[in-house]
Image: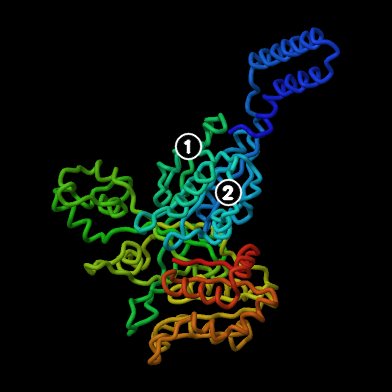
Amino acid sequence: MPSPFSSIQRAWPLLCCIASGACLLWWQPAREVSAALVVAVYLAVSLYCWRGQLRPQAAPDASAHVLVAYASQSGQVRAFAERSANQLREAGLNAQLLSLNALEPTRLPAQRILFVVSTYGEGEAPDNAARFERRLATDEMRALNLDYAVLAFGDRQYRDFCAFGRRLDERLRQLGATPLFDRLEADRADPGVLRHWQHQLAHLSGNGNFSDWLPPPYQPWRLTDRRCLNPGSSGAPVHHLTLAPPNGQEDWRAGDIVEVGPRHDLDRIETMLRQVGLDPHGLVESQSLAVQLSRRRLPGDAELRGLNAHALLALPLLPHREYSIASTPADGSLQLLVREVHHADGTPGLGSGWLCRYAETGEEIDLRIRSNPSFHGPAAETPLILIGNGTGIAGLRAHLRERAALHGSRNWLLYGERNEAHDFFFADELKQWLEDGHLQRLDLAFSRDQAEKRYVQHALRDAADVLRRWLAQGAAIYVCGSLEGMGQEVQQILLGLLGQEQLDKLGEQGRYRRDLY
């Protein structure tokens, strides 16, 4: 879209002609002289315009400024935004990377912006984009002189697939911004959509030389131990898993995520292969056909009967499952807390079924670690308020274990579960930390231990004065656990206690962070 300045520049000769004619008419020493001068000026300006039309237009400046703006809750989408910016830089463009909340919609810093955004919860904007969306929706917004594109990430299992990306695209169009191309929507970071985005970036930069964004390969971690932490609980079983890295050493930070490549029940796969006349134990690339097929999405029984071994191995891999890490590298192992999930028909969930039921101790688990900078811990001198429920204690425990090695840290944990007798995960460790001062405060809420159900958000509400005092001392708030119920209720309690402005300010300062699922 041409800028107002460039439009004035093109119209300048005509303006000069009109102004010159007006001056001459005012002077009027003689009608004949005035007329001659006006004609001369008109011819001169016409020649200028004609030459300007013939002059070749300048090529786009290779250093033109492009902004890549991201909205990411868990860090995965930010990583794709970083890759986008890097691809543009490698093509010779001046590409900057910023979160959406770092932008003021009425004063955008670039005329060309690429939005790489995820949707959070039930159609919400991620925390680092919520303030931007509210400001973009205000009545004070005027038409935008902006060229833009949107890469929206989502999961079609949720009702509001890519809702934030769609709202952003619609609002920008309402404000007159010009889309560079149609919005792209990546279901679970669909590789095909990402390749399409990369090709669009190549068109924008004029450079088709780029590398595909292939996900890092899984590593074969070994399951060394698995034990149920809540026998007798009224809730689903929760298992504590311990895994050893393939090379004896691996690095991560508290707040990082593991991505597990799940598998089907091997007995089921072997039975299925025999039924279609294939040998489940036939070797394919040093592994049996059954093991290879256990990692892949299976068609229906009717479709399966028409496939040979080669066609079966061409089926797409199962989608990965993500879990918060409950340990630090100093512990010598990677630890997870996984609750068994069952479908309506009683069959186990894909990820939890593999990790909690089918995988044998000593077996290899396909696993990779994904950095999650948006949930990395603050400096040791920053007081830390940790809030969570259920298996969310995994991510909070990792932060407490990491900070245990840092002298002078102050920590407060608010945690909720069902029954203290069965569901108080890591109870001995937490009580010991409280006794030795690593935890300054421990607020617990066991919802089924009294007639009136009490949840962690109620414990937070009751500690309002302490919360305000900690925040006045520079504390950060980290929330980990279920989005439905706990996560939303904690958000509402904080809004009621602190107000929208202060909560936004905490988010902008990196002092309010959430890892919800």
Question: Which residue lies under the disc numbered 1?
Answer: 181
Task: Where is residue 277? Give x, y as percent.
Answer: 14, 48
Residue in the picture at 51% in, 84% down: 459
Residue in the picture at 34% in, 83% down: 233
The image shows residue 277, relative to residue 400, as above or below, that is: above
Q: 258 or 475, which is in the foreground? A: 475
Q: Which numbered mark, 2 or 1, is in the foreground of this view?
A: 1
Q: 276 or 224, which is in the foreground? A: 276
Residue in the picture at 63% in, 85% down: 437
Q: Amino acid at mark 1?
A: Phe
Q: 244 or 328, which is in the foreground? A: 328
Viewport quadrant of the N terminus:
top right
Q: CA distance from mark 2 to mark 1?
A: 16 Å
323 relative position to 17: left or right = left
351 relative position to 78: left or right = left
Task: Where is residue 323? Give x, y as percent.
Answer: 44, 64
Q: Are marks 2 and 1 in contact (CB under 8 Å)?
A: no
Q: 174 or 235, which is in the foreground? A: 174
Task: Where is residue 62? Give x, y as percent.
Answer: 65, 31
Question: Which residue lies under the disc numbered 2?
Answer: 69
454 relative position to 172: left or right = left
